[in-house]
Amino acid sequence: MSITPIETRYAGHRFRSRLEARWAVFFDQLGIPWEYEPQGYLVDGAPYLPDFLLYANSDQAFWFEVKGQFPTDSELERAQGLATGSELPVYVYFAKPEMPAPDLSHITTMDQFHGPDQWTWVDEDGWQVISAGPASWEYNLKPTAFRLNPPFKGKTRPPKSGFWWWTDCPFCPAVLLKLRGQVGICPIRHQGEGWVDPGLYPRFAHNTARLQKAYWAARSARFEHGERG
């Protein structure tokens, strides 16, 4: 016996699963421009139809692949091929459309954010500080996604999951996926690589009222037997 997801209609699209439709509801709530399955590709000779293209034709454009379970190695390899061929980042998101972490606004210093440091001896440089491991606030959190990047200087990094959280920028309307929900660099307010506003690390923006409303809308959307949402 085999089962397949019921197609779900929403916003003029026929989604292959309700989970994809819920993410579309989430994007609409936040004003994130999205395109569903805009283009199919051949990746290493095999057909590949990515789920969502977000912020198309902008410096913030990226692919968003929806997974109902942890992705396989072959799915990550295809996503890396898409990132390489399209020259856009690909997020393979396997967590549910729900708040990925509690309010962490009480974490206000870098020591709290990174956790305790430890020292190690390097023959060439002497004593060097390295991270001792996760901070206590990270202990019970679950990773949400993989980010696959286009090659840098001809090389790609092995895939590694992380705490990629939707982050509500306090300076502009952008809502982007960022590690640990950190504001960091505002893509609209500041241009250029490597520039960080003083005082914006650590600054969590994953649990704002706007994001809470969007997660709620995505979870509570009703799609009865594939009917229009």
Image (cartoon, helix red, strand yellow):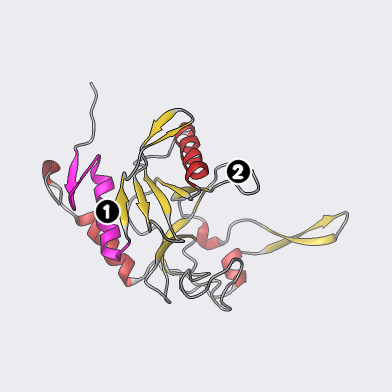
Inspect the magenta stretch and tell me whether residue 18 lies in it: yes
Q: Residue at x 46, y 72 (%)?
A: 188
Residue 37 position in % (x across, y down): 31, 44
Q: Quadrant of residue 216?
A: bottom left
Q: Which residue is rendered at x = 37% and y = 42% of the image? A: 50
Which residue lies most toward the top here? Answer: 1
Neighbour tally class for label 2: few under 14, some 14-19, many 20 plus, Cα within 10 Å? some
Q: 81 left or right of 67? A: right
Q: Which residue is mark 2?
A: 156
Label 1 packing within 10 angstroms: few (<14), some (14-19), many (20+): many
| Residue type indicated by callout 1 | Ala
Residue at position x 55%, y 43% from top?
A: 159
How far across and down, in percent of the image, does residue 76 sit? 48, 38
> 66 and 149: which one is in front?
149
- Tell me which label, 2 or 1, sits earlier in the chain: 1
The extreme right residue here reads 124
Which secondary structure, mark 1?
helix
Residue 28, magenta (yes or no): yes
Return the residue nearer the eye: 66 or 36: 36
Q: Which residue is mark 1?
A: 24
**Amino acid on which disc 2 is placed:** Thr
Residues under labels 2 and 1: Cα distance?
Answer: 30 Å
User: Where are the magenta residues, as a range?
Assistant: 7-32
Question: Measuring 32% from the left and 61% from the top, which residue is drawn there?
Answer: 32
Q: Position of residue 199 (x, y in %)?
A: 56, 78
